[in-house]
Amino acid sequence: MMCTSIMMTTLTSLTLPVFASLISPNKKHSYPNYVKMTVMYAFITSLIPTTLFIFLNQETTIWSWHWVVTQTLSLTLSFKLDYFSMMFIPIALFITWSIMEFSLWYMNSDPNINQFFKYLLIFLIAMLTLVTANNLFQFFIGWEGVGIMSFLLISWWHARTDANTAAVQAILYNRIGDIGLILAMAWFLLHYNSWDFQQMLTLNSNPNSLPLMGLLLAATGKSAQFGLHPWLPSAMEGPTPVSALLHSSTMVVAGVFLLIRFHPLMETNMLIQNLTLCLGAITTLFMAICALAQNDIKKIVAFSTSSQLGLMMVTIGINQPHLAFLHICTHAFFKAMLFMCSGSIIHNLNNEQDIRKMGGLFKTMPLTSTSLTIGSLALTGMPFLTGFYSKDPIIEATNTSYTNAWALFITLIATSLTSAYTTRTILLTLTGQPRFPALTNINENNPALLNPIKRLTMGSMITGFLITNSIPPTTPLQPTMPLYLKLSALCATALGFLAALDLTLMTNKLKMKNPSQMFKFSNMLGYFPTTIHRMIPYQNLLMSQNLALLLLDLTWLEKSMPKMISQAHTTASMTVTPQKGMIKLYSLSFLIPLTLALLLMM
Amino acid sequence: MIPTYMNIMLAFTISLLGMLIYRSHLMASLLCLEGMMMSLFIMTTLIALNTHSSLINIMPIILLVFAACEAAVGLALLVSISNTYGLDYIHNLNLLQC
């Protein structure tokens, strides 16, 4: 009906600037502005189908162009406009619009700004392909598309070796996850004979765990769960708009989105649910611990993203995919805004990213510091801001579900650590005396910078309320619980906040001691990248060097033919020889017949 | 047994043991060989004198001649070993050892 054509309008209008850059590459004077306007119009037009969906609760699927039609498999270009994609598309478009406007200010002095905007747009198209895909093939196209654009955008300043290393790291870790996705795709093709979500999810709803393990591996790779996580902090080498768009709101939630799409299959498989729960719990705690001792503001926000992704996995692990999706939507707002505020601070302090060299920004950058505070409060789950509407139900659901108590406990600890590192960030960047050089030109009075931040601030405050009151009812949650369980998230957050506040204010005038072992563990990300990135390639290269160069010569010359023959002869002759050269023993043995003769004669 | 003969046979036995059991020098073995020869010479001389038979008189002289030849051969071996290895340590003679 109407919403299908409007949705197709939205999706295809996003591809127009890409073609414009191909056809007439030099004519657009303000190509970035054109791209931003396109995204804004796409956002506005996508609100109409979403509103229709909210009122009618009618899911649609668009089957267009039949691409490959064989006897056993038919691949089409099909778009699934259900609850998940309908809610996600306007949010993604809104955030992309704000980030594009922000990068008009941030990347202003970059000569390749047109290419930057084109890359951001291609990324957005790939992400929307992923979200609206109705079959796994189209999903895979979007999945790989976001991976490639992530690579291109992280290594935007490609003359910097750290950026290239980080981009290759992202590709490698995502590839390991892709193995899982391709395994799942192959299994589904063999056993369910189709890659369409409708067919896969309604057939035998109790498959063996192999495809779900593949999907879990894919989510681990793409969403930076523990084990395949180092690429996300390293991805902060890219420009701040890239970090805000890809590595906080959209790309890293693709893995969680995959698991949410397959939730009918995961409902019945307790093994996969337990694995997801434990993996998410470990991730959220480990990332929160690592975020406590970082000194780069972008890395702190990256670890915060990673920790929230772990929380989303925990939610899937307790069989609440709709809550996880709600957390995806709300988390996008305040995380993108946190990144944009960090970008504003970084640019204004002349590209200083170390929080130990910031301070006293409340008076000089009032709007940025206000929105940073609001975003941090939303992140920690301040009641009735955005984060509260998704994070608090998650904690309540984990408290009241029949699940692994250890995973629940460390999730609560991670919640308190969230507010601890957030408090530390705010105290060190915004309060106190300035620790940056005195000759700065701090100027945030640019509408291209302020309007997106203001929009996302409003979003961080009211979107939770709006979304929660307008979505159709999903899986029912436990409405009644004891008071201490209801307040557990709030108490954990308050505890972390008070502890961090106290520690920071008490100790920032003390003499700095040598860092303790715990600090070093936390600062070096648990030594995970240090050991894995060096040891495994070194062993591989050593083994390949030995195999290629040494092994052949060793075999043919020493072990099989010439030296082996001489060795065999020597060993044989040593075994059977009568001569041993033990002269003293031989002369001693003369005594034996003598004594024997004497004894026999007597 | 007459103590004289027992004395001489004891000397012979001690020299025999000394020739077969040695620590490090080859010279010790050669010296004990000389000792054996001498005790045999003394014994044959005493037997020749005590039995008053002059036909046995030739025995000690021939024994002495052969002892001298064999001593010369032994010393020649010792000198050649000493020329090769510098000393006459027994554990130098290990060319056949594997």
Image: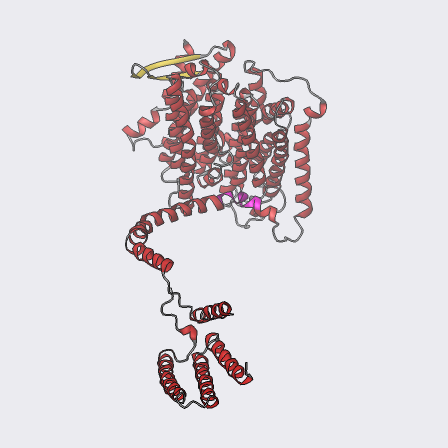
Q: Work out which quarter of the rendered image holds the N terminus of chain A and state it.
A: top left
Most frequent secondary structure within the magenta stretch: helix
Horizontal relation, residue A414 to residue A180: left or right: right
Q: Is residue A379 above or below residue A326?
A: below
Q: Which of A382 and A48 is in front in this view?
A: A382
Image coordinates of residue A76 in percent, x first then y, are 34, 17
Image coordinates of residue B69 in percent, x first then y, are 35, 85
Horizontal relation, residue A270 to residue A1: left or right: right
The residue drawn where x is 48% and y is 12% is A52
Asked if the magenta segment contains residue A588, the reply would be no
Residue sitting at the far right: A483
Q: What stretch is highlighted in magenta?
A: A521-529
Image coordinates of residue A118 in percent, x first then y, are 36, 31
Residue A460 makes an appearance in the image: yes
Q: Is residue A377 above or below residue A541?
A: above
Image coordinates of residue A282 in percent, x first then y, are 56, 34
